[in-house]
């Protein structure tokens, strides 16, 4: 295909607005201005369904990060933002939510082109959740308060004091996000930062920088003061590392792999920068023996195949009672084998490509290792040509010595194994360094209640999986992270508590 024909096929059916935005050359957004990379570097952005280069973005380096951190610091300490009242921040966030909602179709197309997911899913899930979460955080802006205390200082019995606490914004936030839900992950960091009065420097994933840049334009259009939101595009080992280790930031909010999360945590600790880390997972799906096998297979398929398995909480380890094991594996093989792969712009497709060639090869490597270690491929197991496709794959008869059971694959690959009793399945569910999510499938309430406290995970779903709400916290036990996103818990992670003691 010629280059023009390639571009034509990438953008077939895409709105003029989304295409025009994607094809533009993009700089960083710093201090309210669009600027080129200090080193002049530009990074290609690919369409995962075809591998075509759609556009280029600035490749950020330390100097770009320095500039963005200075802009964010100035906005935080000296400019209009530092004097804005909570109600003004609330109104700004409501306007931002309205703007995202008004441009949700366009943002969904940008996300699909950049990330590979279906436009419909991006629109119905990523964008609706982003809008609702910005509105949820808008409400918090006016509800952040401290406590007042009457002290009885034991060594000064004759003096009177009054004391209280203030919740103050933590300061400049460095936000580093992954490529699986680009705009949503950006909003999960920016909305709490703005609600609490912080400012932010956002580094989107190198694979998916576009929706964050469009978000910055929308934030500017609704009156976000310069320097409050800054976006530096670039690679993790350059721009990301410069940001997480920057002495000028007060907090790092990171979502990504546990491996990188550890690097970030160590870099942050040198400056005692606050950290919240939302990391990887290997979430178990536990089916109890009262479940109908066909319903269990449906539920398990949804738990793993959402977003092509590229979900931190993906239900990637399935445990089925040995009496129903065969029927559930057969059901899953039927579902996975019947799924149609295609571009995110193909409404008939049930699963899109993975985000990059690198991820495609990584996932294929895991499938091979499963085969070598004795797993049975009950469905899928191959890559497909064209874009970065991997077939939905069911690996049956797995065990806990296999890499496919122990490590996060982050693709459409489900491992399945049988169990015989409740204590055994609780032990298997917890036999992992991760602790992000888990689901239990049963209508036997007493066994469900016995299992919930045994499972070491930040979220336990019952008869559903991957269902999130702005008001309920999300985060990891064990190596799945530190801190929480969503819910009122997030407010504490973007604020410092200041104690005031006054002699009266
Ligand atoms: P990743 O490789 O850890 O990257 C995440 C972000 O960190 C990207 O922006 C990346 O930049 C950047 N980065 C890489 N190396 C860095 C370094 N040395 N210093 C600073 N930043 C660095 O993760 P991913 O592959 O993009 O995303 C998948 C992972 O995210 C999975 O493990 C998944 O479970 C996890 N995740 C967790 C949650 C949660 O809420 N717990 C949600 C979604 C995803 P570049 O990519 O540009 O190099
Ligand atoms: Mg990456």
Image: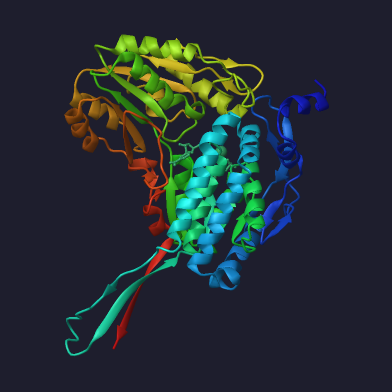
Q: Position of residue 7 (x, y in %)?
A: 77, 28
Instruction: Classify residue 209 by image quadrant.
Output: top right
Q: Is residue 369 left or right of residue 158?
A: right
Colour setup of the view: rainbow
- The answer to which of 504 and 470 lies nearer the viewer is 470
Does residue 496 sit above or below 338 in this rendering? below
For the C terminus, the quadrant is bottom left
Instruction: Classify residue 228 by image quadrant.
Output: bottom right
Q: Position of residue 145 (x, y in %)?
A: 37, 67
Q: Position of residue 381 (x, y in %)?
A: 50, 14
| Image point (49%, 46%), residue name | 132
- Any part of residue 247 in sight: no
Circle count: 0
Does residue 457 sit above or below 442 in this rendering? below
Does residue 463 sit above or below 479 in this rendering? above
| Image point (60%, 41%), residue name | 104
Q: Is residue 14 left or right of residue 332?
A: right
- Any part of residue 470 in sight: yes
Q: Is residue 472 left or right of residue 364?
A: left
Q: Position of residue 97 (x, y in %)?
A: 55, 50
| Image point (45%, 19%), residue name | 369
- The answer to which of 110 and 388 lies nearer the viewer is 110
- The answer to which of 313 and 103 lies nearer the viewer is 103
For the N terminus, the quadrant is top right
Q: Is residue 126 left or right of residue 107?
A: left
Instruction: Classify residue 25 by image quadrant.
Output: top right
């Amino acid at each position: 295909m010629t280059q023009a024909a390639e571009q034509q096929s990438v953008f077939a059916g895409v709105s003029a607005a989304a295409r025009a935005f994607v094809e533009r050359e993009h700089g960083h957004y710093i201090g309210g201005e669009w600027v080129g990379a200090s080193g002049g570097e530009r990074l290609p952005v690919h369409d995962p369904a075809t591998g075509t280069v759609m556009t280029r973005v600035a490749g950020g380096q330390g100097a770009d990060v320095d500039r963005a951190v200075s802009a964010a610091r100035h906005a935080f300490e000296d400019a209009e933002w530092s004097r804005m009242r909570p109600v003004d921040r609330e109104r700004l966030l409501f306007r931002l939510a309205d703007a995202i909602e008004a441009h949700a179709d366009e943002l969904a197309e940008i996300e699909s082109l950049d990330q590979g997911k279906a436009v419909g899913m991006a629109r119905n899930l990523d964008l609706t959740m982003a809008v609702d979460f910005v509105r949820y955080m808008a409400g918090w802006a006016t509800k952040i308060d401290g406590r007042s205390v009457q002290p009885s200082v034991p060594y000064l019995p004759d003096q009177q004091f009054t004391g209280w606490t203030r919740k103050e914004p933590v300061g400049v936030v460095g936000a580093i996000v992954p490529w699986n839900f680009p705009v949503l992950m950006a909003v999960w960091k920016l909305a709490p930062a703005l609600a609490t009065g912080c400012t932010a420097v956002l580094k989107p994933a190198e694979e998916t920088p576009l929706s964050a840049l469009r978000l910055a334009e929308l934030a500017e259009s609704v009156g976000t003061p310069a320097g409050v939101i800054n976006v530096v595009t670039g690679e993790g080992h350059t721009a990301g590392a410069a940001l997480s280790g920057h002495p000028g930031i007060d907090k790092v909010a990171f979502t990504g792999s546990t491996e990188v999360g550890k690097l970030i945590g160590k870099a942050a600790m040198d400056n005692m920068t606050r950290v919240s880390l939302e990391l990887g997972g290997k979430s178990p799906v536990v089916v109890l023996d009262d479940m109908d096998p066909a319903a269990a297979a449906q539920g398990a398929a949804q738990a793993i195949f959402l977003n092509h398995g590229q979900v931190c909480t993906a239900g990637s380890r399935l445990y089925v009672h040995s009496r129903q094991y065969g029927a559930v594996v057969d059901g899953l093989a039927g579902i996975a084998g019947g799924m149609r792969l295609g571009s995110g712009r193909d409404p008939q497709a049930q699963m899109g490509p993975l985000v990059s060639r690198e991820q495609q090869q990584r996932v294929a490597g895991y499938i091979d290792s499963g085969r070598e270690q004795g797993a049975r491929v009950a469905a899928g197991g191959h890559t497909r040509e064209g874009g970065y496709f991997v077939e939905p794959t069911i690996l049956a008869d797995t065990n806990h010595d296999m890499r496919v059971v122990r490590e996060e694959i982050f693709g459409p690959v489900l491992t399945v194994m049988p169990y015989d009793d409740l204590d055994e399945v609780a032990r298997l569910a917890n036999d992992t360094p991760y602790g992000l999510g888990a689901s239990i499938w049963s209508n036997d309430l007493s066994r469900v209640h016995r299992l919930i406290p045994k499972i070491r995970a930040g979220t336990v779903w019952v008869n559903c999986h991957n269902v999130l709400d702005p008001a309920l916290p999300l985060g990891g036990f064990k190596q799945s992270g530190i801190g929480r996103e969503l819910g009122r818990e997030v407010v504490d992670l973007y604020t410092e508590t200041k104690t005031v003691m006054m002699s009266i």
